[in-house]
Amino acid sequence: MMELKLKALAKINLGLDVLRRREDGYHEVRMIMQTIGLYDRIVLRKTRKPGIRVKTNLYYLPENENNLVYQAAQLLIDEFGIRSGVFIDLQKFIPVAAGMAGGSSDAAAVLFGMNRMFRLGLSREELMRRGVRIGADVPYCIMRGTALAEGIGEQLSALPPMPRCKVLIAKPSVSVSTKFVYENLKLDDATRRPDIDSLIEALHDGNLEGAAACMGNVLENVTIPNYPVIAQIKEEMIKGGALNAMMSGSGPTVFGLFAEDKLAEKAYQKLRRGDLAKQVYLTDIYNNAGKRV
Ligand SMILES: C[C@@](CO)(OP(=O)(O)O)[C@H](O)COP(=O)(O)OP(=O)(O)OC[C@H]1O[C@@H](n2ccc(N)nc2=O)[C@H](O)[C@@H]1O
Ligand SMILES: Nc1ncnc2c1ncn2[C@@H]1O[C@H](COP(=O)(O)OP(=O)(O)O)[C@@H](O)[C@H]1O
């Protein structure tokens, strides 16, 4: 197999709670992860010339070892002494630095693809264990679907799939670094925390409205005071009929869940015409096979 075409799907966090700060600066989390239908396209090609070459359609993304796809390829080349080279063509559609695990999902796709291309024989779990060296969200991006993520995000348990609904995505043009958000999170009694257990219960019941009502992201305590546009987008989605709307990951992307396709389409058009967010998408919930539910 000389060439593989891969899709790297984005995620949203239906719930995100932080339990404590560890000695090494990382945080122990409890998050509900969900794959959605927004994706980057990756073409992975085997080359006779050794080494890794990366090409992307976004001028501001690195094409060297700072790109997470480069790191994913390097990891397997080193461990397995792979002698051919690889060319990775990365076409980005997932908003960058947005809280949607775009880079992590690209890395996950390359790990998955190289495992097949070079017949390394690694199981999904073995790939996941390697992925965490690249980023806390990489193991989940290999697993996909609906999952509870604990530890720093790498301890995963599958959950019953999120019921079908429309997902409206809006990314305002502000940049927020994940590191900044975690560093500025205060975990005192005044902090509003989501109830992750109730969210899990609603998923077990297949209850969309119940799950939406339990959504919450503790990191909004840091980002909303700094970027009020996030709260404005949430309000607009809820006014437009969303069951609920919330920031994904460390932000600044906001997503809204809609039970009715028509309302979702209307809210999508309105946000696209307005000026709260430049990048606006309407998509669906995806499962762990990378298919729409
Ligand atoms: C917030 C979340 C929620 O899914 O996602 P994004 O907003 O990035 O999509 C994740 O916890 C982000 O995971 P990821 O983006 O893979 O993190 P990494 O690259 O490993 O770490 C970036 C920085 O975030 C902080 N970090 C990350 C994960 C974690 N559990 N605790 C942390 O404190 C650390 O300061 C670290 O230096
Ligand atoms: N393949 C990649 N896609 C996107 N960003 C990447 C990639 N490789 C490295 N990066 C760097 O990682 C940073 C955050 O990436 P991204 O995964 O999009 O955000 P988030 O973790 O918020 O979902 C960017 O600033 C970018 O420079």
Image (spheres, rainbow, N blue to C red):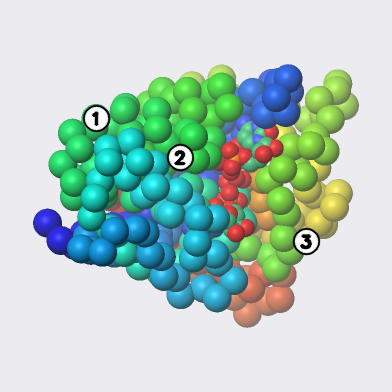
Asked if the residue at label 2 sits under 8 Å from ligand 1, the reply is: yes
Q: Could you say which disc has been placed on residue 64 in the image? A: none
Q: Is residue 201 left or right of residue 17?
A: left
Query: Residue sitting at 41 percent across and 70 percent down?
Result: 55
The residue type indicated by label 3 comes to Val
The residue tagged 1 is 123
The residue tagged 3 is 229
The residue type indicated by label 2 comes to Val
Q: Could you say which disc has been placed on residue 138 in the image? A: 2
Distance from Cα at disc 1 to Cα at disc 3: 43 Å
Up/down of 168 relative to 89, above or below: above
Q: Pointers 2 and 1 in contact (CB under 8 A)?
A: no
SS label for mark 3: helix
SS label for mark 1: loop
Instruction: Find the residue positioned furthest to the bottom.
Output: 273
Front position in the image: 153 or 75: 75
Residue 21 placed where, x, y %?
73, 23
